[in-house]
Amino acid sequence: MPPRATHRLRVVIVPGRVGSISAHEAFEGLDAIALCGQAEDVRVHDGDREFFLGNEQGGFHVRCPVTGEPAARPFAHALQTWREGGPREMDCPCGAHHDLAAMDLQPPAAFSARWIELCEPAELEPRHGTLLDERWPGWTSLVVRG
């Protein structure tokens, strides 16, 4: 199940590439109490189906990765089609077909079946970043409110 909309600030950490180790394996050795203050404020998700992870409270901008042209409406339509089982691609205003993940998304967002969600997190310590670098090369963190 994707993260639910709330008023809380969340950081969602996603792997840098498809086929990486599970979120549970990546999370092993990270101190939940140091990250968030309470173990229940850390959620680790491993699934087979991808979800779109991004800001859920508006103010989301989508641009073509080639021309920089605004593409929020076609992206929203294509995202809904994908959620209903269609392809993860869109017809861009530039005339090309793009994978939804290739679009310039601001604030950043991701498609992933695996993630680590931190609710109201403390600052990530260097040792946590080092462990994630080793386990999920190219990992990305998304700051999400909603």
Image (spheres, rainbow, N blue to C red):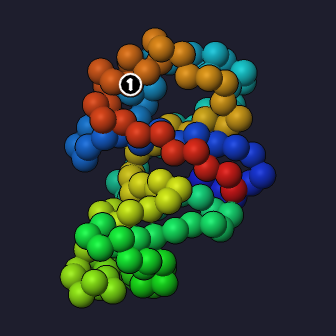
Please, which residue is most extreme toward the top here?
127
Q: Say left or right for 144 vs 68.
A: right
- Where is 70 relative to 31, above or below? below
- Asked where in the image residue 91 lies, by quadrant, the reply is bottom left
Amino acid under disc 1: Leu
- Where is 89 relative to 55, above or below? below
Q: Which one is in front, 54 or 105?
A: 105
Name the image quarter holding the N terminus.
bottom right
Residue drawn at (64%, 42%) of the image:
10
**Residue 102 appears in the figure:** yes
Q: Residue 69's spot in the image, x, y percent?
A: 38, 77
Residue position for label 1? 132
Residue drawn at (38%, 17%) of the image:
130
Q: Residue 131's spot in the image, x, y percent?
A: 38, 18
Residue drawn at (52%, 68%) of the image:
61
Q: Say left or right for 118 vs 93.
A: right
Name the image quarter holding the C terminus.
bottom right
Circle 1 SS class: helix
- Asked where in the image residue 48 lies, by quadrant, the reply is bottom left
